[in-house]
Amino acid sequence: MIEAGFAQVAQALLWPVLVLVALAFVYALWSGGRTLMEAVQRARHPGFRALAVAEGVSLEELELQVLRQIEPVRLLSRLSPMLGLIATMIPLGPALQHVATGQGAQALTVFSGAFAGVVLSLAAASIGLAVYSVRRRWLLGELLAERKARGVAA
């Protein structure tokens, strides 16, 4: 009884998880493109700064600004693989049932969809990790420069 309930809940989660995987992939592509555009701007304008340093802004506020800018891609790189695993595991039970009943073609169709979800989520995580690493380096460099400009030890 409980197992059947769990199976129904898991099946109900499949479409929301697939939607989240698709959104993660689209966001990864968008943030990757945004980072490439920023790289072009930084190459053309050596003094380019992504941190908005205004009069009276404390270093703590700047650190929070850095975190706000990079936290979404950090979460993307960490959550996407989990979503991919969920997208793979949910259809696994029904696919194995198809195999057990000799319906290999139907099982293959289910497996193809499951593997597509994990591939997209891993691609999103990879892009997210690359964007996170690059943007973190840039923003921490800007924060360090601001600390030096203010005469504060790092």
Image: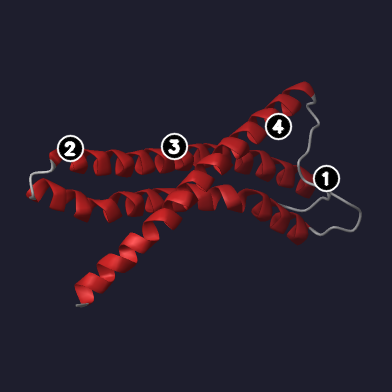
Q: Residue tagged by mark 2?
A: 105
Which quadrant holds the N terminus? bottom left
For marks 2 and 3 on the same chain, the one whose residue lies earlier in the sequence: 2
The image shows residue 82 at horizontal and vertical percentages of 38, 53
133 or 108, nearer to the observer? 108
Q: Amino acid at mark 3?
A: Ala
Dot in front, 1 or 4: 4
Q: Is residue 56 above or below residue 50?
A: below
Cα gap from disc 4 to disc 3, whole angstroms: 21 Å
Residue furthest out toward the bottom: 1
Q: Earlier in the sequence, mark 4 or mark 3?
A: 4
* x, y percent for residue 68: 67, 55
Report which residue position mark 4 lands on: 38
Q: Which residue is mark 1?
A: 149
Task: Classify mark 4: helix, strand or loop.
Answer: helix
Asked if disc 4 and disc 3 are in contact, CB closer than 8 Å, the reply is no
Using the numbered discs, state the Cα–Cα distance from disc 3 to disc 1 in whole angstroms: 39 Å
